[in-house]
Amino acid sequence: MIKITRTLNAEVDKEYLLFIDDQPVPDVRIQFKGGEAGEGVYDLHPLSLASYEAIISHSFNAFPAYIGESGSRFPLSEIEFRLTPEQLGLITLIKISEGSVTFESRPNLGDWNKPYGFSEYCREASKYIKESSNITFFYEDSYGRDKYTTYFMMWFPAPTPDRPLNSNISKYSDLIRETHEKVVGQLISENNSHSVIASFKDFPPEVRTYCEQYLTYFIKFLQDLGVEATSEIKHEAGRVLFTVTPKNEHEALDKIRTALAAYLQLPNSPVSNDPTNEIALQRLESQVLRFQSDLKLAAAELQAKNATIEAQQLTINVQKALLSGDIFPPPIKHIEQEKKTDKEEDREEFLGGTLALTTYKDKGVEVSWAKMFRHLRDLFADEDEEPSD
């Protein structure tokens, strides 16, 4: 049961309080439109994510009209929730009425510090949405000395008034996150034509530092292959963006992508037993072993902090995810296949045979680190290849 009551308690900073199942919902502002003498409406403004989720777990019709002292009725008109930056892409406000759900973006362009413009974002999002769904998307360019955009809006149909609001809103939010990630990835790639960008979901807090350290070491790995480059790690809307920029802008980016794809798979492969005196290979092996050890230690520390059976099972699941290759997608299969031999073994080889997928060898993966390293080094040393843009 939901009700709104008026309070005259001087210690309460709100004049009206919202109750759900006889429990007060904190962080909700109730705004009335219209006077006590006539008919009017009210809006709900949840001020925290918890109060917002509590409200949208009910249907629109579950919120009763408030009856004023003169008997005037004030039905619910709209629910408005302001989001913090990057909580849902670039969305800053969600408005829910009986007939529609509106997502708005009105960022402070004075603080805009992204490598792409807000106008670019709106145009790219508009194209993606038109190609992938029937969402109503609107943005308007303002005209002055320059053409620019200050806001965009997205409209979705609201659930029927008797269904919980979150039955549809959660799907809308997921679609907006997916759209945002694809648009940002596209724009960053376009604005970094001389860089390689890898995008990952946010790393678990327990291993974030270790994962980012491992990514950063890739620059030393490239240096050992004969390529000078710089790297940058940014966090964007629940994603980690790892950018690698070669100092020579004519360096073939497709080769750097190939090297990065192989490098990201090493922590999930058997440790190399290849005898070698090459310092670069020993340094690489040391770095991978350190990263694997850090992951195991983080999983053990997490498990030690939890005592309940459920927490222990969660820890086990996290540990499996950390050590199964889910940290660093894409998987090896995204590397271009070169040849297939020994049909009975069902074997796929990559990078000139230095790395192979099998069905029944050690965890399904064979790796010759020495051959992989030398193959990559030869790849970068091949001057017959035309430079990439």
Image (spheres, helix red, strand yellow):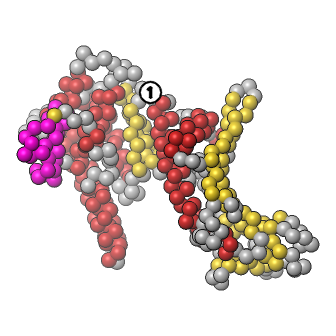
Q: Look at label 1 and name its amino acid.
A: Ser
Mark 1 Cα shell of 10 Å, populated few (<14), some (14-19), many (≥20) = some
Check the image and report above or below for 31 versus 231: below
The residue under the point 79% across, 79% down is 7
The residue under the point 48% across, 30% down is 190
Q: Where does the magenta region start and end?
A: 340-366
Q: Position of residue 350 (x, y in %)?
A: 19, 36
Q: Is residue 224 left or right of residue 95?
A: left
| Quadrant occupied by the N terminus | bottom right
> Quadrant location of residue 42?
bottom right
| Quadrant occupied by the C terminus | top left
Find disc 1 in the rendering and name its residue.
193
Q: Nearer the viewer, residue 307 or 57?
A: 57
Q: Is residue 365 magenta?
A: yes
Q: Position of residue 81 (x, y in %)?
A: 66, 60
Check the image and report above or below for 73 versus 127: below
> Quadrant location of residue 59?
bottom right
Q: Position of residue 71 (x, y in %)?
A: 87, 79
Q: Is residue 10 visible?
A: no
